[in-house]
Amino acid sequence: MKLTIKNISLTFTAGAVAGLMNMLAIWLFGMAGITKALGVKIAPHLSAPWLYNRLVWGGLWGLMFLLPSRNLSYPLRGLLYSLAPCLVQLLVVFPFQAHKGMLGLQLGYLTPGFVLFFNAVWGLAAGLWLHLTTEQ
């Protein structure tokens, strides 16, 4: 994808929309008690700051779609790119900012799996958004 204002706005928007999908998935799993049933303490409440955080960071992560690719589809690239926010969440945010231990294990032993899953939701949503709104 060429580095143009149009493509920057498309990729940021794709990431922000995907951030919304990610946020809704996390919230729904928490509300349905799925995370709690599996021993993971991730059940955030919907709030404006939490939404804002997901939209902005989702949009910023979406800029990765501007990187050159090797003819991978947008959804596949999204899954691949979703590993970057996973690593940041598990190796930086949980241990050093949230003080929840390395990989967030203080939230439950399945936390890394949920982080991978919820970020995969982001990656697929961003990839599908770009697939539907651009010509590859």
Image (tube, rainbow, N blue to C red):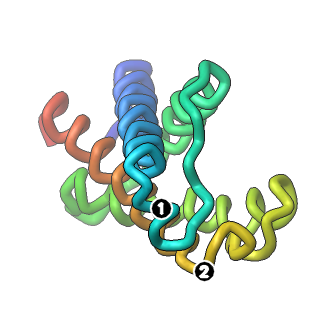
Give the answer, above or below, for where 34 lies relative to 39: above
> Which amino acid type is marked by label 1?
Thr
> Which amino acid type is marked by label 2?
Tyr
> Label 1's element?
helix
Name the residue that disc number 2 marks: 109
Instruction: Identify the residue at horizontal 27%, vertical 65% (top origin).
Output: 70
Percent position (x, y) of residue 116?
A: 46, 67
Instruction: Identify the residue at horizontal 56%, vertical 48% (top origin).
Output: 43
Percent position (x, y) of residue 106?
A: 74, 72
Q: Residues within 10 Å of mark 1 (few under 14, many from 20)?
A: many
Q: Quadrant of the C terminus?
A: top left
The answer to whether residue 65 is visible is no
The one of 10 and 14 positioned closer to us in this rendering: 14
Q: Quadrant of the N terminus?
A: top left
Q: Which numbered marker is on residue 49?
A: none
Name the residue that disc number 1 marks: 35
Asked if residue 108 lies left or right of residue 5, the reply is: right
Q: Residue furthest bottom?
A: 109
Q: Earlier in the sequence, mark 2 or mark 1?
A: 1
Instruction: Identify the residue at horizontal 67%, vertical 24% (top origin).
Output: 49
